[in-house]
Image: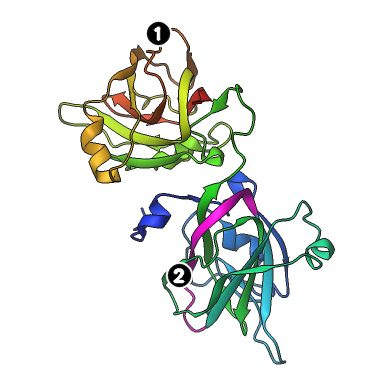
Amino acid sequence: MTEQPILPLWAKQSINLADPRLGALAIAASDEFFAPLSRMLNPEPAVFIPGKYDDNGKWMDGWETRRKRTMGHDWSIIKLGRKGVIHGFDVDTSHFTGNYAPAVSIEATSSASDNPADLAQVQWQEVLASTSLSGNSHHFLPATTHGEFTHLRIHIYPDGGIARLRVYGQPVGAFDEPGKLYDLAALENGGRAVAFNDAHFGVASNLLLPGRGINMGDGWETRRRREPGNDWCIIQLGTSGIVERIEVDTAHFKGNYPDRCMIQAARMDGGTDQSIITQSMFWPVLLDERKLQMDHIHSFADGIAALGPVTHVRLNIIPDGGVSRLRIWGKVAP
């Protein structure tokens, strides 16, 4: 697997609001001659394919404009997958060396319309001042303004390419109906994977994605365990809630699904992700050990312990294997 960059704390404690799996869209761009804007939002790490060309030149995995021969600079507009408070950005120029954008700035707005003509009339607010970029690098840049936004306008000076843009933040308005049953762990509701002991074949954050997994790669899967014990991952819920139903979906996992699962939970106030890992070993059991089947949605409502409001859950899979999705259905704690 491609080595992942080390994220700053504000990114670790956020979700990527620009993930197309949450509904993020490429709206418009001044130029997309070498590579379309939509590639910049791809949730997978950027790749470089030697010798791959298309009709306009070298195929690049990102957004790339032609060489500008006039005054001005290039720009693009994207819609975030969820309205949210932005904490910062990863402007990733991986594999762009002699063709990366030398500088970037970002503006944001909140709009009910995705129409470029309407977006041209709204008021935009700077959330990232003009910043120099380097080639083939991740640039973790904190936002300068923390309002609630739905759309971004990205300016590159004067032209060039960006492989990926990650917009780290927290969704807002996810829990606006009192008494409603929500998937408290869903990525679009602000849930996040805090930690896991292994993710050899698939990352734990896949558990929180919308819909069912499209294949085995679209879930969390650990290596084959060759020693005693079991694998686990810890999920922070989007908000504190009282759990009423749990779904464990093993879609596409057939010869490699876990034999059993068990879930612990707790309300955590303060601490760090590292301290939560240590404390999670002693959390009370939310759902006792249950047998699992291959390629199946398991729904558990009976036997869920009355632990009151919880903020974190620990999914234990016994002994190892793959799970596609985890749904923690509950009501927001008063």
Local packing at callout 1 (Cα closer than 10 Å; few below 14, some 14-19, many 20+) is few
Q: Which residues are magenta?
A: 80-98
What is the chief secondary structure element of the magenta stretch?
strand
Residue that label 1 marks: 303
Quadrant assignment, res 224: top left
Query: What amino acid is found at the position of numbered circle 1 in the picture?
Result: Gly
User: Where residue 152 sits: x, y (%)?
Assistant: 65, 63
Q: Which residue is mark 2?
A: 94
Give amino acid for label 2. Ser
Whole-percent x and y of residue 218?
Answer: 48, 39
Outermost residue toward the top? 302
Residue 94 image offset from top left, x and y in percent: 45, 70
The disc at residue 53 is: none
- Label 2 Cα crowd, 10 Å radius (few <14 / some 14-19 / many 20+): many
Q: Helix or strand or loop: what does disc 1 sit on?
A: loop
Q: Is residue 197 visible?
A: no
Q: CA distance from mark 2 to mark 1?
A: 48 Å
Q: Is residue 136 left or right of residue 153?
A: left
Give the mark nearest the N terminus, 2 or 1: 2
Whether residue 92 is in magenta: the answer is: yes
Residue 46 point in image, percent of width and height: 48, 62
